[in-house]
Image: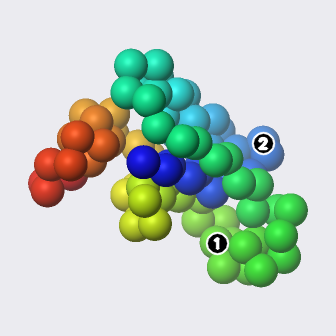
Amino acid sequence: MRVEIFSRRECHLCDEAKAVVLRVRADTPFELAVIDVDEDPALAERHGLEVPVVVVDGRKHAKYRVDEQAFRRRLAGQADA
């Protein structure tokens, strides 16, 4: 399973989302990529100020805030996540 977090520096919501993802990752292993949208002009334009975005296996899971329980359900493959 691969999780991507599209974020930017000095973004408190991004820091909060990363903390949730890392907390879950401590007991549920998955591949993680943190992508700074400001390092790629196309990503910066695509996301604008709408970060963080958390993507699980290519599908958007959350934007702005990550609900830890919903994220855990998504990783467990439960459809309501």
Where residue 56 sits in the image (x, y, percent)? 42, 55
- Residue 57 relative to residue 49: left or right: left
- Depth check, mark 2 against mark 1: the one in front is 1
**Residue 20 visible in rendering:** no
What residue is pinned by disc 1? 47
Q: Extreme top residue here?
A: 27
Res 10 visible: yes
| Tag 1 secondary structure | helix
Q: Residues within 10 Å of mark 1 (few under 14, many from 20)?
A: some
Q: Tell me: residue 68, above or below residue 54.
A: above
Q: Position of residue 7 (x, y in %)?
A: 67, 53
Q: Report the side of 10 relative to 60 (left or right).
A: right
**Image coordinates for residue 33, horizontal then vertical, percent:** 64, 47
Considering only vertical position in the picture, is 57 above or below 32?
below
Q: Residue at x 66, y 79 (%)?
A: 46
| Residue 41 falls in image quadrant | bottom right
Amino acid on which the number 1 mark rests in the picture: His
Which corner quadrant of the image does residue 69 belong to? Answer: top left
Q: Residue at x 26, y 47 (%)?
A: 74
Q: Is residue 8 left or right of residue 53?
A: right
- Per the rendering, the mark at residue 10 is 2
Q: Residue at x 59, y 65 (%)?
A: 50
Viewer-proximal residue among 41 and 34: 34
Are circles 2 and 1 on residues that touch, CB within 8 Å? no
Amino acid marked by disc 2: Glu
Measured in 3D between alpha carbons, the distance from the residue under mark 2 to the one under mark 1, in whole angstroms, is 16 Å
Marks 2 and 1, the one that precedes in the sequence: 2
Q: Is residue 78 left or right of residue 45?
A: left
Camera-nearest residue between 76 and 42 = 76
